[in-house]
Image: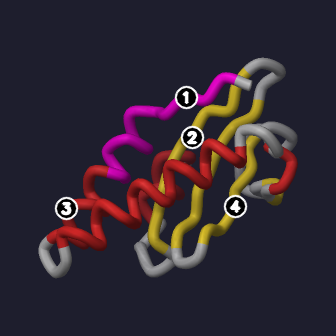
């Protein structure tokens, strides 16, 4: 299965790395690389995540928690598209406003 990242997901990873790097640069790299490795494994088993009931396409949009991080993704027959990568403490109201 082909793995793709949305522009928002790429920006999320950059933002998370920069935030963590302010306190611990080595941890920032380790955490982001770990998230990417886990997402690569998720592409092999895309049904592991739970459906996102609030998504426009409940059958295709899923999310999976990796430690303190939530990866939201969309599954098609040939690809897994990472939509967002968020820390569980982040305010997700912006995501809700985008759907309204």
Q: Earlier in the sequence, mark 1 or mark 4?
A: 1
Q: Which residues are magenta?
A: 2-13
Q: Are marks 2 and 1 in contact (CB under 8 Å)?
A: yes
On the image, the x and y values in percent for residue 89 come to 45, 80
Q: Are marks 2 and 4 in contact (CB under 8 Å)?
A: no
In the rendered image of this protein, does residue 41 appear above or below residue 26? above
Say the numbered circle drawn on residue 64: 4
The circle drawn on residue 4 is 1
Mark 4 vs mark 3, CA separation in Å: 22 Å
Q: CA distance from mark 2 to mark 1?
A: 6 Å
Q: Residue at x 25, y 72 (%)?
A: 20
Where residue 45 appears, x then y in whole percent? 82, 45
Which of the two discs, 2 and 1, labels the residue nearer the N terminus? Answer: 1
Residue 57 image offset from top left, x and y in percent: 78, 38
- Asked if residue 18 lies left or right of residue 34, the reply is left
Task: Measure the alpha-carbon separation of dots 2 and 3.
Answer: 19 Å
Residue for badge 2: 82
Q: Earlier in the sequence, mark 2 or mark 3?
A: 3
Disc 1: CA contacts within 10 A as few (<14), some (14-19) or many (>=20): some
Q: Are marks 4 and 3 in contact (CB under 8 Å)?
A: no
**Where residue 18 is drawn, which disc sits there?**
3
Res. 87 image quadrant = bottom left
Circles 3 and 1: CB atoms closer than 8 Å: no
Q: Please, what secondary structure does the residue beneath circle 4 have?
A: strand
Which residue is found at the position 61% from the left and 29% from the top?
Answer: 3
Residue 72 drawn in magenta: no
Residue 21, x across and y down, in percent = 18, 69
> Which residue is at 59% across, 56% downward?
71
Callout 2: SS: strand
Sequence-first tag of 4 and 3 = 3
Asked if 67 appears above or below 15 in the picture, the reply is below
């Amino acid at each position: 299965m082909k793995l793709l990242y949305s522009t928002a997901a790429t920006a999320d990873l950059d933002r998370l790395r920069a935030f963590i790097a302010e306190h611990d640069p080595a941890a920032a790299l380790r955490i982001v690389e770990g998230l990417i490795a886990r997402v690569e494994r998720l592409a092999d088993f895309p049904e592991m995540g739970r459906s996102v009931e609030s998504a426009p396409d409940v059958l295709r949009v899923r999310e999976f928690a990796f430690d303190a991080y939530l990866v939201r993704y969309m599954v098609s027959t040939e690809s897994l598209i990472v939509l967002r990568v968020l820390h569980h403490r982040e305010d997700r109201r912006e995501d809700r406003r985008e759907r309204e």
